[in-house]
Image (cartoon, rainbow, N blue to C red):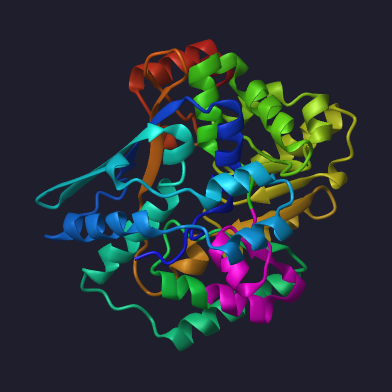
Amino acid sequence: MLDSLLDNDFYKFTMQSAVIKRFPYARARYAFINRGDHTFPPGFAERLREAVDAMANLSLTLEEKRYLERTCPYLDPTYLDFLSGFHYNPEEVEIVQKGGHFTLHIEGLWYRTILWEVPLMALISEIWYQMGDGQRDSDALIDTRTRDKIEHYKRLGLKIAEFGTRRRYSYSVHDRVVASLCHHGGDTFSGSSNVHLAMRHGVKPIGTHAHEWFMFHGARFGFKMANSLALEHWVDVYRGDLGIALTDTFTSATFFDSFDKKFAKLFDGVRHDSGDPLEFAAATIAHYERMGIDPRTKTIIFSDALTPERVERIDNFCRGRITTAFGIGTNFTNDVGVTPMNMVIKMTEARPEGQHWIPVIKLSDVPDKNTGDADMIELAKRVLALSRRA
């Protein structure tokens, strides 16, 4: 069971606030995608249903509201008052299990359903391990492993954040990892994407927006305008705060076509989430240079399947050329001697105000990670001339 409404990734709250302001009548559908072809044990759906139903009792405490007021001044009082009255509606979540096969769908107003994805994935992961036969490593070994990693990053002089809520082994492991990072990380540990744990351990909540922000704009405004309007609406809401832009919803090459000098100057940097990180870094540096912007004044946040070896390779390539930071997820919160689950929950359809349901898609920099309706994916590739790019 979850103990806090804030046990969620920070960008879910920042996006929720933006959705309320720009698209309050939009509706959304999401689906669980079992990328790892995992088999679910008998009774799994019932256990998850119980945990989901219990989420209706979660609410923002006064202490949590005061924390957000102090820490996140760009979240305005009207949004924090809304969040104080927010309750999950479990009726928005459909859970079905047939044998070892499990499905999950979410449907409702976008500003409400946007909060389900991350805590549901955390619950799916934790319950799956609880009902399995595997034994995790000891707390002492997890503490040592986490300490060794953050001390390695400290020696390299890096900035490291923890992004591991959605595929964590358990809440207790997640809490131990953040505690260890705080204790041993010093200035190297920049914060956590999990707002509850950031508050609990006195560090900064980290995040801006996710793919669904751009996916919705593709459905609402068309693929050619999706990136530029998603960025424009973000700037309209946050006025320069939360200035890291996600690049790969419709491929990073398409994103950089829209990331003109205005946006390149307004945003503090970009986030890498798929594809070869060194190729991405080279393309980002070249883009800033074409805009007449010194890349050393901008930041790339890397967040794709990072390990200490991968981080060090990226740092060696970027050092002195562009500022870097790293958001590390599963390698922190599920490096416990078991195989992490390979799963996602993605928006599948959107219904903008006054329109019908429209499939939404994501065109990753890694084609195997493309998600969504196959016909709509092909349409987007034609509209964006991606075949000619290849």
Residue 308 shows in this picture: no
Percent coordinates x, y for residue 205 in the rendering: 64, 59
Decide: is 227 above or below 344: above
Q: Does 328 sit left or right of 356 as displayed?
A: right
Residue beneath the point at 82% across and 26% down:
262
Q: Quadrant of the C terminus?
A: top right
Percent coordinates x, y for residue 347 in the rendering: 41, 34
Between 304 and 190, the one lying in front of the other is 190
Between 316 and 376, the one lying in front of the other is 376
What type of secondary structure mainly makes up the magenta span? helix
Give the quarter of the image for residue 306. Answer: bottom right
Give the quarter of the image for residue 319. Answer: bottom right
Q: Quadrant of the N terminus?
A: bottom left
Residue beneath the point at 39% across and 49% down:
88
Percent coordinates x, y for residue 234 in the rendering: 68, 32
Direction left: furthest residue: 99
Is 184 colored magenta in this rendering? yes
Residue 73 shows in this picture: yes
Decide: is 79 above or below 24: below
Residue beneath the point at 37% across and 74% down:
337
Decide: is 260 above or below 222: below
Between 257 and 161, the one lying in front of the other is 161
Q: Does 142 sit left or right of 185 as displayed?
A: left
Q: Does 8 sit left or right of 98 as displayed?
A: right
Is 198 colored magenta in this rendering? yes
Give the quarter of the image for residue 171. Answer: bottom left
Percent coordinates x, y for residue 317 in the rendering: 74, 52
Between 181 and 209, the one lying in front of the other is 209
Residue beneath the point at 70% across and 53% down:
72
Residues drawn in magenta: 177-206
Q: Does 359 sit left or right of 323 as displayed?
A: left
